[in-house]
Image (cartoon, rainbow, N blue to C red):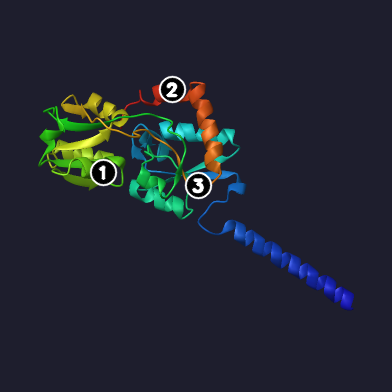
Amino acid sequence: MKKLAATAMAGILAVTMAACGASEESTGDTIKKNDKVLTMGTSADYFPFEYIDTAKGDDIVGFDVAIAKEVTKNLGYDLKIEDMEFGSLLGALSAGRVDFVMAGMTPTDERKKNADFTDIYFQSKNLVMTKDKAITSDDELKGKKLGVQLGSIQEALAKDRYKDSEAVSLNKIPEIIQELNTGRIDALIIEDAVAVKYMDQDKALKTYEIKEDGPTGSAVAFKKGDKMRDDFNKELKKMIDNGDIDKLAEEWFQKEAK
């Protein structure tokens, strides 16, 4: 009888432990990597890097997304994408709500305090964009209102380099373009690859290249100490070496901004 009771109790414990294990696996904000899913955090307002394809509903597409899909596939993972404001991305990464961040993000020294970055996979330049009248020097921006995306490298650039100007920080690139078009700001700072299609749509837009020291390209951010960064880096290097990233850039940078 004791043996029977003990057997029954062992069975109950086994079921209970299995239930607890299932609960641990399915709860919490962080998606476990052994589920074979990696969650990418992004801000889908940065054409052509990441944006919502309105023709297909709410699908997030773009240059960064295409790269992420290829890398995660090669590593044996499915890809999930979480859209949020740019300024929230590294906080979500640190909190474990996403596994990595791809959002045209430059690996500045300040950001490196909170995340580990891959090597830069795409080089870019920052431009000052104006409407109707072009500028030819930094001096012309004194006393002007400069539109920038909140939490971006362009915001830091405006505050550090153009101290005699007023930085106007907004969440979305289209909002900043609208502010320029309506005259509520005098200029904006924007990445060259993002600027080109807006300029194609509006010939009144003019740009001036900002000369900078240090990194100006895009890299992928991972949580501090995450070894997945190194695996991701190897796949990115393969794509750079075999020309795949150049092919994707050619494909996505030819698309029309919506």
**Quick check: 182 above or below 198?**
below
Point out the tag, 3 or 1, that comes first from the N-terminus.
3
Q: Nearer the viewer, mark 2 or mark 1?
A: 1
Mark 2–mark 1 Cα distance, whole angstroms, equals 28 Å
Camera-nearest residue between 126 and 213: 213
Residue carrying label 1: 155
Q: Are marks 3 and 1 in contact (CB under 8 Å)?
A: no
- On screen, residue 84 versus residue 23, left or right, reads left
Residue 249 marker:
none
Point out the tag, 2 or 1, that comes first from the N-terminus.
1
- On screen, residue 31 versus residue 247, left or right, reads right
**Residue at point 41%, 31% (across, down):** 63
Question: Which image quarter: residue 134?
Answer: top left
Amino acid type of the residue that numbered disc 3 sits on in the rendered structure = Asp
Mark 3–mark 2 Cα distance, whole angstroms, equals 25 Å
Dot 1, crowdedness within 10 Å: few (<14), some or many (≥20)? many
Residue 99 marker:
3
Q: Nearer the viewer, mark 3 or mark 1?
A: 1
Name the spot of residue 153 as percent of width and height, x first: 30, 41
Q: Secondary structure at mark 2?
A: helix
Mark 3–mark 1 Cα distance, whole angstroms, equals 25 Å
Residue carrying label 2: 246
Name the spot of residue 3 as percent of width and height, x first: 88, 74
